Amino acid sequence: MAGFASEPAPAVEAAIFDLDGVIVDTAKYHYMAWKRLANELGFDFSPKDNERLKGVSRMRSLEILLEIAGLRLDEHSKAELAEKKNQWYIEYISTISPAEILSGVPEFIGGLRKLGVKTALASASKNAPTILGNLGIASLFDAIVDGNAVSMAKPNPEVFLVAAGRLGADPRRCIVFEDAEAGVEAAHRAGMYAVGVGSPDVLRHADHVIPGFAGLDPAAILELAQRRRTPRCTPHCQV
Ligand code: BG6
Ligand code: MG
């Protein structure tokens, strides 16, 4: 297996980007919609609780929300609540525009492509096509995999492995950019290098954490990933 200390470091073939909270701050719209639902059900929902929902599927998010409140509901009621939340969310994102693309994202992805790195979007969201359409950035990606194309939500690695497959890239030669703990875990389970986008306090398991993409040098990130010498599953890790 490539990546052990005695073997050459892998060259990066592909970069895979999460959408919500990485390309655009839709995480705040998801939070607003879940909080509205929680309040309607009679409990509060804090930003800290919300971290557990990031990256995970809509239905799993609802289950976590209900767990927090200590509520048990039947499948029909859960489906209704998830749909209600989604309608609010769709309303919030209906006016999203290119101005909301996070700073430095198009430049960074463009820079990677100039260096010969393939790019993919890998999101758990079934609303990803709407968001990409409103932002006008679908052409930044060689492949797009969203919640409509996969059945197992992060931290399952399926979405990243499907993205790598569509790019024809070796998963061990892929870098993932993720704002969610579940996404970092999914990237690692796929054998990929995980760059956390956000706070190191939250993204404790990421291989490297960046606050955002503004001014970020694509070549420097590739260099970091290429220096990775051991997979995290070995007892003698020395990243
Ligand atoms: C992820 C978000 O990208 O997509 C989660 O981080 C969200 O918060 C999930 O629950 C599913 O999104 P959607 O748009 O299909 O409800
Ligand atoms: Mg995200």
Image: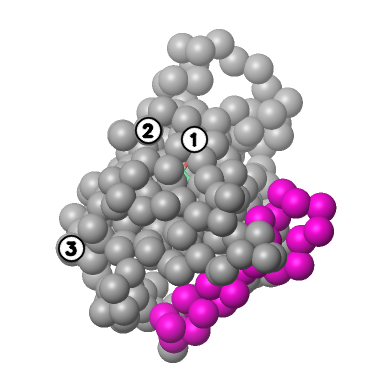
Mark 1 C-beta closer than 8 Å to ligand 1? yes
Helix, strand or loop under label 3: helix
Residue behind mark 1 = 153
Of the pair 80 and 206, the residue shown nearer to us: 206
The part of the chain drawn in magenta is 216-239
Residue behind mark 3 = 139
Residue behind mark 2 = 150
Residue type of the residue flagged with mark 2:
Val
| CA–CA distance in space, label 1 to label 2 | 8 Å
The circle on residue 188 is: none
Expressed as whole percent of the image width and height from the top left, the position of residue 122 reads 38, 50
Residue type of the residue flagged with mark 3:
Ser
Task: Say which quarter of the image contains residue 238.
Answer: bottom right
Q: Are marks 1 and 2 in contact (CB under 8 Å)?
A: yes
| CA–CA distance in space, label 2 to label 3 | 21 Å
Image side of residue 51 versus residue 167, left or right? right
Task: Say which quarter of the image contains residue 67.
Answer: top right
Q: Is residue 238 magenta?
A: yes
Of the pair 13 and 105, the residue shown nearer to us: 13
Q: Is residue 48 magenta?
A: no
The residue located at (31%, 34%) in the rendering is 149
Q: Is residue 193 above or below residue 60?
A: below
